[in-house]
Image (cartoon, rainbow, N blue to C red):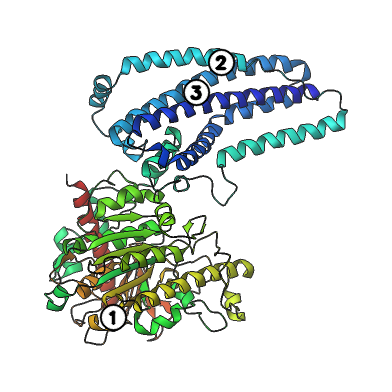
Amino acid sequence: MKERINAYISTFLSILKIFGFWITLFFIARVVFLFSFGKELIFSEHIYELFKAFIMGFRTDTMSLSYFLILPFALSFGFFFVSIKNILLYRKIYNKILLWYGIIFSVIIVLGIIADYYYFVFFADHLNILVFDLFKDNTSAVLKSIWTDYPFVRIVLFLIIVFFISRFIIKKICKTEVQIIKNHGKLKTFILSIVIVLSCMVLLFTGMRNSWGTFPLRMENTGVSNNSFINKVGLNSFFCLQNAISAFQKQSINTDIEKSIKKSGFSSINEINDAYLGTKELINETPYNEFLEKTPPNVVFVMMESMSQFLMEYHSTKMNLLGELEDVLPNCYFFKNFMAADNSTISSLEEILFSSPLHPISQSTYREKELSSSVTLPFKDKGYQTYFFTGARLNWRNLENYLPKQFFDIVEGEKAIEKLISGTSKNEWGLYDEFVFDRAFNQLAENTAQQKFIYIMTTTNHTPYGVPLEYKPYPLTMDKIFKERLKINPVIAEKQLITFQYANHYLGKFLKRIISSDFGDNTIIVITGDHSRPSLINFSKGDFYKNYTVPLIIYVPKKYRPQHVVDTTRFGSHKDIFPSIFNLTLSKAKYINSGNNLLTTDTDTTYFFGLNHNNFGFSKNGALYVKEDLYYTWKNSDFEELELYNDSISFELEKLNKKVRSRTAVMEVFIKNELKTE
């Protein structure tokens, strides 16, 4: 047994030494990268952040290299299966494989570093999803460009040098020989062998995940500074390429307009427009309003993480889910028959911001495109300053690079807000909501003569659930009925509910703070959830639709309130938010008519309906799934419970079907035209 374990330890040490050699290559590359592209950086002002970037670099390098070393690590287990007399022969064969494996991957690593270097020269970024566009271009032209624009011959010569240097170093590494296990007795040797093998496996597993948390190290976890260049220092070509491949696989954006028309079930764009818009135009304009011309309000939009409407319905004094938000709701328009556009944050974000049914644009090859459907644009055209604040890391979903293209003047995430707000704390997803609200309030208080549009995206109410240690929860006693509907253990559910309560409580404090401020009577606040939280409750056949429901809450100061009574029982979804807000806040402003104005007095020509995932729709007439061809009607007039409809399709449900299909199609066609435009 001792011969086997000694051979195993020797080969594992060889693997560790090769890892050390490769880590050194990455370190040298990182230093070269820093001095090549960071010439404008004043190093003395960023010493600590650069140190953290290099630590992050070690982590991303370790993660990439751990995957490279899976094969030699797996082959090392062969020493426990060959016969004792063949151990030396297996070691000889293994060393030969390790030598050439190490040489080949050394060259591949250096080639990846060089490719990433020149990619950064051109794109000012590491390898990303745009690299796949190279394969869509004229191949011969690309090859010619590589030959003429880059030092191809010198690169080849350099790789040949790397080959021989690697061969020299790895050949020496393969001679590693140790005799750690000697005459310890069979039982002790067996126990030591198990401990050593398990330790090596744990070491490799740790390297591959680079985290003992819920998730492995991901791109959104690599930010160490609010300086985007410093954040790039900690990345390597293979980590970025892996992220690019993942993003490419998720990309489902096809700009074939005919495909959208065919999929919609309509015969032409004109038929689609007629079904969705009727006599209206896709590009609309708000009416002239002298009061808004003279006193345009601030607009604050808050997209709350997992703000579920069905969960808010369980609020009571014994199970307090709202905190201070409860005090503000009576003074707001509160739409409860309302759905999220989609069931993931990025999809809902892009639906709200651009009315796009195609996702994710922010990580696609079209991420450099400005979209005229951006809700920021009408505010910009009216002289507003535009802001995006989130507690998340801005490299999540490429927001750092994407949002400035969509007419936001200032985009701030975790790192920037940490520097501006003292005493911050955070969880795995970013800063706790209260600090993001503090940042937004401070911005509103600054230069109050300047109108502002602020988009806030919170993150706290997300698994793994948790709140700041100082937070003292309100009572959260789950009654028997609620416990019976739980999908999960009550202890875990309580953690979720505390986090939900915390998020709502600090949202309420934020609203109160604005309302009581000097600029409170000049600030409109709009709140919704990015999506619901279906993982908590078991829904019945009749209320399954609550899986998709989120609230729409609008606080409007008295002087901006419509003169008429607003019907808050209307059905809607994210598509309707900004058509409503533009008409409430802007005079003579052009916007994309992507949804309904929920605040309108027009009930004759407006068909109010909600849409989720471009497939499920609901209205006062019932509900349906388009792809599954399932139809439902309401059991009674309180719109609480649906029942499957088995009769021939009614005129009202057929109209809902057309609205759902045509709205998806009309915005798909619009966005595809935008993306295709040079």
**Secondary-structure class at tag 3:** helix
Task: Kindly report the distance in space between the C-alpha atoms of the residues bearing marks 2 and 3.
Answer: 13 Å
Amino acid residing under circle 1? Pro
Which quadrant of the structure image shows residue 575? bottom left
Task: Kindly report the distance in space between the C-alpha atoms of the residues bearing marks 3 and 1.
Answer: 64 Å
Pick the quarter of the image with the N terminus.
Answer: top right
- Please identify the residue farthest to the front as the structure is shown: 44
Q: Nearer the viewer, residue 249 or 206?
A: 206
**Secondary-structure class at tag 1:** loop
Viewer-nearest of discs 1 and 2 = 1
* Disc 2: which residue: 169
Amino acid residing under circle 3? Phe
Mark 2 or mark 3: name the one nearer the start of the chain.
3
Q: Answer few, some or many: residues within 10 Å of disc 3's Cα (few below 14, many 20 plus, some between 14 and 19).
A: some
Viewer-nearest of discs 2 and 3 = 2
* Disc 1: which residue: 557
Amino acid residing under circle 2? Ile
Which quadrant of the structure image shows residue 564? bottom left
**Secondary-structure class at tag 2:** helix
Q: Answer few, some or many: residues within 10 Å of disc 1's Cα (few below 14, many 20 plus, some between 14 and 19).
A: some
Task: Kindly report the distance in space between the C-alpha atoms of the residues bearing marks 1 and 2.
Answer: 73 Å
Mark 1 or mark 2: name the one nearer the start of the chain.
2
Mark 3 or mark 1: name the one nearer the start of the chain.
3
* Disc 3: which residue: 105
In the displayed structure, 272 sits above or below 154; it is below
Pick the quarter of the image with the C terminus.
Answer: top left
Residue for point 67% across, 23% down: 11
Question: Is residue 377 rendered to the left or right of residue 614?
Answer: left
* Residue 601 at least partly seen: yes
Total numbered labels: 3
